[in-house]
Amino acid sequence: MATSPDNPGKKYSGKKHSGTASSAPYPVSRLAPATELVDLAKNIADADDTIQSHVSSKLNIIAEQIKSLQQQAHSILTQAQRDQELHRATCRCQRIVGHHYYLYKKENGELYFSKLSLNDWQGTPPHEYQATYRLEADMSWTEINDDNDEADNGSKQTQADWSATLNLSQLKNLESKTDTD
């Protein structure tokens, strides 16, 4: 550093720093460590390494998220394609949301839905049984793996729905009777 022409021993020629010692642009204490160009370069290199490490880890996380999103997109597209194929299967009855449909395959490869399960055919259906599906409110299909448990749960749910409907209609009748009295 160049010395000031007014004071040959003084290395800094600007205004005197008036803030805290930690915010000074130069060492304010004779006991403070001397700052060398090599130290400054080492600090910059350490900062670069730390920044590179953080950036690398963040980019790795983003890459993993992209892979996960790609897998989810593939799964969604595969399921949508399957749902479209199932909607194209022949069905000679009206499809109702929440009901179970049994998919069969004819010898010529044609798929069709039936309301008759394997139990209804007494184990010998006229065509090859493929799977059981439930039509969802969003018009997607959910494959039912354990036919007996799901059918039992479905019938119990239907009975509960009917009971609730009957109770509701009975309540309406009671309300109408009390309103007229």
Image (spheres, rainbow, N blue to C red):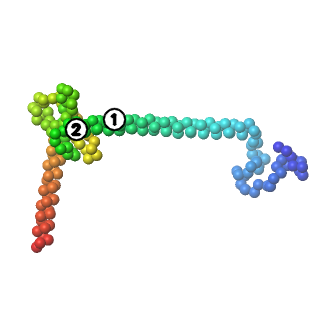
Helix, strand or loop at label 2? It is strand
Q: Where is residue 166 in the image (x, y as percent from the top left)?
A: 13, 56
Give whichever of 74, 173 is nearer the camera.
74
The extreme bottom residue here reads 181
Kindly identify the amino acid type of the residue bearing the numbered disc 1: Thr
Q: Position of residue 124 (x, y in %)?
A: 11, 29
- Residue 139, quarter of the rendered image: top left
Q: Residue at x 19, y 30 (%)?
A: 105
Rendered image: mark on residue 110:
none
Question: Disc 1 designates what residue?
Answer: 78
Left or right of residue 40, residue 148 in this image: left
Q: In which quarter of the image is the C terminus?
A: bottom left
Residues packed near mark 2 inside 10 Å, few (<14), some (14 to 19) or many (20 plus): many
In the rendered image, the vertical position of residue 81 relative to residue 23, given as above or below: above
Q: Where is residue 13 in the image (x, y as percent from the top left)?
A: 83, 51
In the rendered image, the vertical position of residue 152 relative to residue 111, given as above or below: below
The extreme top residue here reads 107
Question: Disc 2 designates what residue?
Answer: 133
- Residue 125, quarter of the rendered image: top left
Q: Which residue is drawn at 67% across and 36% down?
A: 45
Residues packed near mark 1 inside 10 Å, few (<14), some (14 to 19) or many (20 plus): few
Give whichever of 159, 86 is nearer the camera.
86
Q: Which residue is drawn at 79% across and 55% down?
A: 16
Q: Where is residue 159 in the image (x, y as percent from the top left)?
A: 14, 49
Q: Residue at x 53, y 39 (%)?
A: 58
